[in-house]
Amino acid sequence: MSKEFDFYDKTSLKSYNLNESMRYQLSMLDKLDAFTRQHSENVASLTCRLCEYLHCNKGFTAYCTLCAYLHDIGKLKIPPEILQKPSKLTDEEYEIMKTHTTIGYKMCMSDLQLRPYAAGPLYHHEALNGTGYPQGLTKSKIPYEGQIIRVADEYDAIVSKRQYKTHIGISDTLRILIEDSKPGSGINQSTALAQMSEDCKLGKTNPVIVRTLFKVVIDDIIYEISYTQDYVKELKDELKRFEQIKKYGDKMNKAKKEKDKNYYLEGMKILMKNNETPENYLEIYEQYKNAYETRKAMIENLFNEIKIIKKLKV
């Protein structure tokens, strides 16, 4: 009865005719662990959509999307015990994890077909205020594709960690990205040097891209509302069918003649589907009612989520 909702389902990369050009590049993802591969695909989908909302041209969008697909390719060389560690990494382990950026860059540069997309692995953890890695670059030195992929990467990492099944509560994730876009984020403000630095006027992420992400998320929520409303309509039709079955069932239980009982029983069976029986239909009926009320409440919560997001300021 339940239906899965995919955050990235609306993205159609076919519009950029990427299938052919990506065949080789995407084959690299087959070597990644399942979690990293899914994350890479999610970040690419989100990057593609951000480019669309940012009104990037078709060529740059295709290029940026491929950079995003390959942004974590360096994790192929990170020891599994570090890459897949469920608990917090030690400082030493974190330093090793950070090398996936330069490793990925070298992997791309050593392969003629991957070389054009080396910016994805190298720049996606750089921060506008210079607190990122591997080079600690600041705003003007970080390519635009790196700035876009960083926002997509951070968003999907939080979403995956929190295992969202719907956009309800997603505004909390956006608040984290807002904090990263604020001036001084990640900088130790206690030092006089930091206080004087021009970079303190910048956050880690580009606020324009974060603001654009809001539009993408709201669009997704509207899609989820529409998707859920369609399901609610299906449930409503099913409930009407069960109500009719129940009417026959009530009449059957009240009937005194065997002939009448059989008549109403046959009426029930005609309306039943799949594994529904006179013995279990009330239990299934309750499940449908619960699903209907749950989805109706979900729709209301999603509309409220849009209101909250529209009030967020970057």
Image: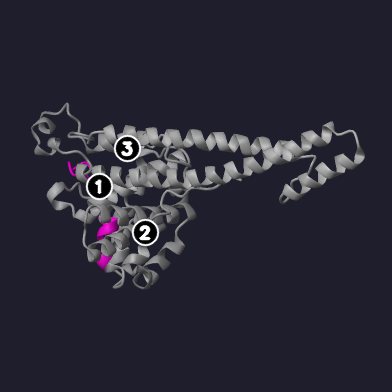
Q: Which residues are magenta?
A: 116-131
- Residue sitting at x 58%, y 41%: 236
**On residue 31, which mark appears?**
none
Tell me if residue 23 comes above or below residue 34 in the rendering: below
Q: Is residue 128 left or right of residue 4?
A: left
Q: Which is more toward the observer, 113 or 264?
A: 264
**Distance in Å between CA atoms under marks 3 and 2:** 26 Å
Tell me if residue 127 comes above or below residue 117 in the rendering: above
Q: Is residue 6 left or right of residue 245?
A: left
Q: Is residue 162 left or right of residue 179?
A: right
Residue that protrudes farthest toward the right in the picture: 258
Tell me if residue 297 comes above or below residue 49 in the rendering: above
**Distance in Å between CA atoms under marks 1 and 3:** 22 Å
Q: Residues within 10 Å of mark 1 (few under 14, many from 20)?
A: some
**On residue 174, which mark appears?**
3
Instruction: Please name the amino acid that badge 3 sits on.
Output: Leu
The secondary structure type at the circle numbered 3 is helix
Q: Residues within 10 Å of mark 3 (few under 14, many from 20)?
A: many
Instruction: Please name the amino acid that badge 2 sits on.
Output: Ile
Q: Is residue 34 magenta?
A: no
* Residue indicated by mark 1: 133
| Spot occupied by residue 249 in the image (x, y as percentages of width and height) | 78, 37
Could you tell which of marks 3 and 2 lies nearer the N-terminus? 2
* Residue indicated by mark 2: 73
